[in-house]
Image: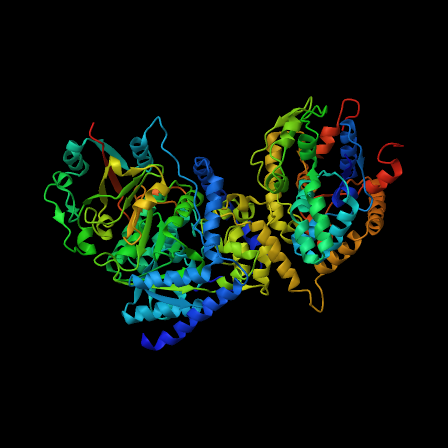
Amino acid sequence: MRVALMVTCVNDAMFPGTGQAVVRLLRRLGVEVDFPQAQTCCGQPMVNTGYLDEAVPAVRSFVRAFEGYDAIVTPSGSCAGSARHQHQLVAARSGDAGLAAAVAETSPRTHELTEFIVDVLGRTDVGAYFPHSVTYHPTCHSLRMLGVGDRPRQLLENVRGLRLVDLPKAEECCGFGGTFALKNSDTSVAMGSDKARHVRETGAEVLVAGDNSCLMHIGGVLDRGRSGVRVMHLAEILASTEEQPA
Amino acid sequence: MSTPHTFVGMPRFPEAARAALADTQLRHNLAHATGVIRGKRAAVVAEVENWEELRLAGAAVKERALLGLDAQLVQLEESLTARGAVVHWARDAEEANRIVIDVARAHAVDEVVKVKSMVTQEIGLNEALEASGIAAWETDLAELIVQLGGDLPSHILVPAIHRNRAEIRDVFRRRMGQVGRPAPDDLTDEPAVLAGAAREHLREKFLRARMAVSGANFAVADSGTLVVVESEGNGRMCLTLPEVLVSIVGIEKVVPTWAELDPLLRLLPRSSTGERMNPYTSTWTGITPGDGPQEVHVVLLDNGRTRALADEVGRQALRCIRCSACLNVCPVYERTGGHAYGSVYPGPIGAILNPLLKGTGDPQTDSLPYASSLCGACFEACPVRIDIPEVLVHLRSKVVDSHRDDRVPKPEAVAFRGAAWAFADARRLDRAERLSSVAGRVLRRRGRTSLGRLPGPGGAWTDARDLPVPPAESFRDWWKRTDGGRCDG
Amino acid sequence: MGEVRAPRASARDEILGRVRSALQGVEPVTTPVVAPPGAAAPASVGLVDHFAERVADYRAVVVHCPPDGLAAAVAAALPEGARVVVPDGLPDAVLAGITAPVRDAGLSAAELDAVDAVVTCCRVGIAETGTIVLDHEPDQGRRALTLVPDRHVCVVYADQVVADVPDAFPLLDPRRPLTWVSGPSATSDIELDRVEGVHGPRHLHVIVVDEPA
């Protein structure tokens, strides 16, 4: 099985540690991923802001980079959702039947990381070790657009040393929402502040989620409030071992 | 009722939201009310084993009505006429209001009682009647609170959701006596006591009213039956006691057959008030000799609905049965309230319905599709499966497309064109990332791990949130340097 | 209203024209949608008791009686000395429980407002939702009768109870005015908290007449 890592533009530029964790984790599970250098962005920021024409080059880069792979794995529920549910729309807008055909190949092969581990690899215990209290925020796109369900929880529950603390109102949006965070920054921050308050209420040392963009937002509010809570991508916890702790 | 209450001239959503967010009483009222209704809805929805199948059926019924709307409307008209109703057609608000005023004048009435109706708010009927010297008495408790308070509605189901019991008591004490029977001297803020005061205040109006105006939740084409779903009995009063009844019905309210009403009557109360069934549902079919109004008018209203129907992605919004479940679960609505949307249709459904009905071009309307984090909670709750996030994204593209020929493009458009250029070729992206890595290395050498307040557009982020300093090396460069971690130095 | 007829006709044509142009190329669906079945009453409770429980959930008063105890149950539902209005076609077995009933001979709304209670039958009882449906036949009377008085005593025969909403539809004639009643008048308009008692009858008293043993 040829597996490609779609690291996402946000992780590539801002959170390389998450991509490195995915590589380490999957290698430990016996999967060598490729990193197609032609990849750029899934196009979601443009689509979700209404710039469909501007999303076409990104989707072209996507299919060029990932054509021919059996599985495309990404540490982002949001970007997986974009590839699975929005690329057809962009391809249709481009009027290019070739692009639409290519998207029909790549879209269904795109997996969010926890879907790939649980559904494709059939693993719920990845042999991780992380001796900290952790609370988990299910991001909206993984929860409602992809329907990853309790896969992330199953994986976290099997991490040795980890104490999982329930997050109050966990399923409520953190308020990131892509350009919503800028265009409606007051509302975005009001939502983020409530989310950060719930995180602090848990007393957990670490907030974990499957999307670094949401974590950047919640973490930004937590840090501004000097909360001391650390935010981490799920992949980094799952990659963590006694020999190589996160 | 002399104060003009109107949404005209409302600021764009972000500015209106900022003002609303600063109102702590409002946020408290909304968080409490939406919390209560979410819990109730979740409990009664969980009782229904085949809820998802029921949603599919509800969506299919409304979709079937919309996709054959011309024939459905003609059939509805025939059925109504055969039962003695007078059918009118109104292209827009003005035409609909004119029809109601003409009927009122023909009967020389100077007041009408009203059943809570979104569509009459949409067309500004009360204001039009007032301008013609006809008083319109709202009889739904929440509408009464809004009307007496000279306020604007902020929720589809509970227009006074932004008011708590103490505020309602004050409005009743202050205003009831000016328009009819005053509130009792010993009025407390107990909800049951407040409801009792509304009963006393409105009863004299019900008993003397000669004409009523209603909307309709559904209009059944094959039988000519109109349906009003309510709780208090004010609807029954209006639909039963006066001699003349005018019902204004948006053309999207059609349900093809009597039997197809069934799934909708199962979906609506559970989604709306979180009840297995609402206290009262009235159905009537034209005129029934000896029972209820003996003159019945039905106004079939377009007012932008055909524009929405012409939008292949957006037309699903016309399936809406006005339950307001999407408002109650929306994290944006919960914090900003309904007034920020600048329309009688607030919340997620309002964010798509207003642009679909009015078209793009007005800055306030154009700001609505962006008033969402696209979290998807609305779609999950919608009993007729309107994919609101899908329509929001679609409408955003319509807003952007309407500005493609601007002589001076918006900074955002310039930025996205730049991004499109960079994302077209990974080498361009790599170069941009290297610049950011340089900045990151400089800042990190100075001991910075996060950025504080930034000037310019970045301030929208950093005014209340820290931003991490870019890493010294992108993932892409790390991969190249270490061969994917296989030869890490 | 003669002079405004012409523009109305053109509004009709214009709206239908807009609808047709909006739907160009769309195939209408000609077969009615078949909705999934409703809920069955829990076997452990039984249909009629399920109905009674669900009606009582709305804070309505629900009592059971045997067929020969109907008059007594009706009498017990009415306060001492209450002025009671009745529809023309109320069965004798129900009427027997009412002292000096006022027959509805086209009473005005104000006259109805002066009586204390109304006693009627109904067409259908829906167990799952705790709903009684009135179709305003002579055993129930015109709509105002069950609306204006503050107390509604409603007799439901056990064989009138169906399991859920879809089971009621085939039994109801849409050409009749229908009133679906689920508990007493209520509102959730103040802080979304349900309180009983606004404009409709504040007291709903349901008498379930059980099948003869």
Q: Residue furthest front?
A: C31
| x 21%, y 58%: residue | B290
| x 78%, y 36%: residue | A2
B268 to the left or right of B296: right
| x 35%, y 28%: residue | C43
Q: Is residue C81 visible?
A: no
Of residues B163 and C31, the one drawn nearer to the viewer in this rendering: C31
Q: Residue B272 at x, y = what percent?
A: 43, 46
Where's the C terminus of chain B, which quadrant? top right
Of residues C50 and B191, the one drawn nearer to the viewer in this rendering: C50
B479 to the left or right of C116: right
Q: Residue A61 at x, y = what percent?
A: 77, 50
Q: Residue furthest bottom?
A: C3
Q: Quadrant of residue B472?
A: top right
Looking at the image, is A219 positioned above or below residue C13?
above
Q: Quadrant of residue B203?
A: bottom left
Where's the N terminus of chain B, which quadrant? bottom left
